[in-house]
Image (spheres, grey):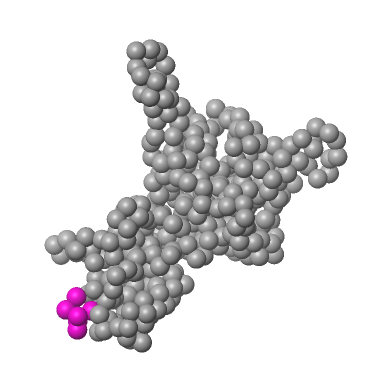
Amino acid sequence: MEETAPVHAHASDMEWLDRLKRRLSNNACNSTLSQPHHDDLKRASVLVLLDSKGNVLLNQRSLYLKSHPGEICFPGGKQDPEDGGDDVVTALRECHEEVGLQFQNPSKKDEEDEKLPKVEIIGAMPTIESLHHLCVTPIVALVPDHHHSELPLTLNEKEVAAAFWAPLDFYVKNTPIELYPLEWSGETFWYRNYSYSITEPNDSSRGAGNSSNRNKRRRRTRAHAVNVTGLTAHIAYEVAKIAHPNHSDSSFVLLRQFQRGKSKYWTPKCFVFATSMLHQHDHDSQRNRKQNAANKKNRLMLDATCQMVDYTEDPEYAFAFQLIVLDGKITWTLAATTQEEKDAFQNALFQFLKSSGKRNDIQE
């Protein structure tokens, strides 16, 4: 499979990598990041493998597997006794077993080993308890000298149906189709579901002898969407958030509360400040297509009476707030997933109102 989304990171812009190294370099790559209640769980590792341009490797699990068939995941699996309790060894071994990627071993100096690509271990993310009650350690690693096109994959068809590379910043630049808080094993997570478009060879194109060359070329590949969800989406977002903290260009992925009859529900949307208004879009690509301007019903005029106040009626959404405009005539109820996201939106709102000459403060 190949990704259809553009590669966003450039070789000359390695700030994303510097951020990852600063944040993760002091994190031990073993059990030191485990939560106390993870200590008694069996261990597993996943490899968040990045190429030199900031693309991350993902697998699609075989449909014949009993556990999570067909789902998108990082290379990884359970820790084996021969791994010596080392989460990095587990992650690299699983990657080799699943997609055939093998890297240089620093302890070897022979010619064959030097032909292999180098891998740099950046660090580990906090451990997570999986649905099958494994203590999962995400290991973030980099292939510093190679773009993914230079890293041929050999899939283990018993475990992996397909593999592809996706830009890491996709997970902070795009609006998930689902976003809601989820209580799991004493912790609160935000469940994310991303739709990602990939292409793959189209076997049905063979034998079309009477078609034009253009139609032949068109049928050699086919595009379809896959869903990146659950543990994989959570890890991808958390790593991307470190690497690309200033992704938004004044756009934000927030939840908005709607009402249908007597029922209230939350839906993730993309919001952007433009032309004295807050514009709401279903996703980031819609924003780009419409050059920020939303339909009339999805625009909020930010006038001099604009207030941002906390919303506490739904305790499940701890970082919810309301935007009140036109002397209280119109209210939008929104929610961020973290206090950091909420603060960033408030700062952007303040700067937007100030630059447009509407007002110099916001009532909190």
Q: Eyeballing the image, is 217 above or below 360?
A: above
Report the front residue among 87 and 23. Answer: 23
Residue name at image x 62 percent, y 42 percent: 147
Report the front residue among 199 and 160. Answer: 199
Could you tell me residue 104's position as x and y percent? 76, 41
Farthest residue in the front direction?
213
Could you tell me residue 105's position as x and y percent? 78, 42
Residue name at image x 56 percent, y 43 percent: 57
Farthest residue in the left direction?
261
Which image quadrant: the C terminus? bottom left
User: Range of the magenta residues?
Assistant: 325-330
Report the front residue among 302 and 338. Answer: 302
The answer to whether 328 appears left or right of 244 in the picture is left
Report the front residue among 237 and 316. Answer: 237
Q: Quadrant location of residue 362?
A: bottom left
Could you tell me residue 110's position as x and y percent? 85, 35
Q: Can residue 191 be seen here?
A: yes
Q: Eyeballing the image, is 215 above or below 279?
A: above
The answer to whether 110 appears left or right of 82 in the picture is right
Residue name at image x 13 percent, y 62 percent: 261
In reply to whether residue 305 is colored magenta, the answer given is no
Could you tell me residue 32's position as x and y percent? 67, 62
Q: Can residue 43 be seen here?
A: no
